[in-house]
Each structure stands twice: as structure tokens, then as C-alpha cells.
Image: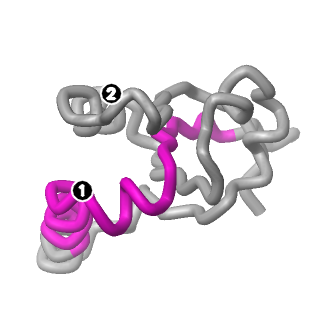
């Protein structure tokens, strides 16, 4: 039986903006991590600095000021719902969310 690739969803932005300037983002990750720990729920989200998978998305990559950071999750509705940068991101910071099917080793 062949293993099926998982589907991962992500939102990506300039690292300085997402990690230094966006307080909502830090609070969101802290609270989600705490909540998962309290419920003994397996973590389904990761923060990826300079994700290599962006090479497969040249139209996204060329719009990002580097270094970039991605919030990746197997929970598509959460990534879509938590597209938290939409309302605040200045034009100089590209913010994109998309889905990618990849093997996660």
C-alpha cells in the first residue's frame, strides 16, 4: 500500500514583519501552542524560516522581501481563517496563503 502525501497549507510573509512587528502573530502561536498542550493534541502547525518549498512557487517568491517565514499547517481551514496579516500588511510585505501537497519526512 502506497502512502499518500499530506496536504499542507501555509501563509508566508517577510520574517521581520511576521516575527518582529506583528504582535497578533506571536500571541496567536503562543495561545495555540498552549491550547494544544493542555488538550494533549498533536501539533499540526510549524514555523518555517526561509522555506525551500517556496522554490516551487516563483510567483510568490519574487514578491517576498527576504528573509521569509511561513506558518505551515495540515489544518487548511485554520490557515484560511487565521489569514491574520490580511488586514494590516503594508504593501511592501507580500503575504500569501496557499496549499501544497508535499511529503513531510
The spot of residue 49 in percent (x, y) is 60, 65
Dominant SS of magenta comes to helix
- Residue at the spot x=20%, y=72% of the render? 30
Residue at the spot of label 2? 80
Q: Nearer the viewer, residue 21 or 2?
A: 21
Residue at the spot of label 1? 22
Q: Nearer the viewer, residue 12 or 38?
A: 12
- Residue at the spot x=38%, y=55% of the render? 17
The N terminus - image quarter = top right
The spot of residue 7 in percent (x, y) is 60, 35
The answer to whether 73 appears left or right of 88 in the picture is right
Q: Nearer the viewer, residue 100 or 97?
A: 97
> Would you identify the image quadrant in which residue 20 lies?
bottom left
Res 12 label: none
Q: For the residue labelled by badge 2, is the local secondary structure a helix, a strand or a loop?
A: helix
Q: For the residue labelled by badge 1, is the local secondary structure a helix, a strand or a loop?
A: loop
The answer to whether 68 appears left or right of 86 in the picture is right
**Magenta residue span:** 6-33
The C terminus - image quarter = bottom right
**Above or below: residue 51 compared with residue 55:** below
> Would you identify the image quadrant in which residue 21 lies?
bottom left
The spot of residue 98 in percent (x, y) is 54, 26
Mark before the other along the chain sequence, 2 or 1: 1
Camera-near label (2 vs 1) is 1
Amino acid at each position: 500500500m502506497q502512502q499518500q502525501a499530506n496536504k499542507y497549507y501555509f501563509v508566508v510573509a517577510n520574517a521581520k514583519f511576521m516575527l518582529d512587528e506583528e504582535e497578533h502573530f506571536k500571541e496567536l502561536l503562543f495561545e495555540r501552542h498552549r491550547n494544544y498542550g493542555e488538550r494533549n493534541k498533536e501539533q499540526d502547525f510549524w514555523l518555517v524560516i526561509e522555506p525551500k518549498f517556496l522554490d516551487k512557487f516563483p510567483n510568490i517568491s519574487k514578491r517576498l522581501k527576504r528573509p521569509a517565514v511561513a506558518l505551515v499547517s495540515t489544518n487548511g481551514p485554520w490557515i484560511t481563517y487565521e489569514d491574520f496579516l490580511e488586514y494590516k500588511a503594508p504593501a511592501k510585505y507580500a503575504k500569501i496563503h496557499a496549499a501544497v501537497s508535499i511529503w513531510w519526512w
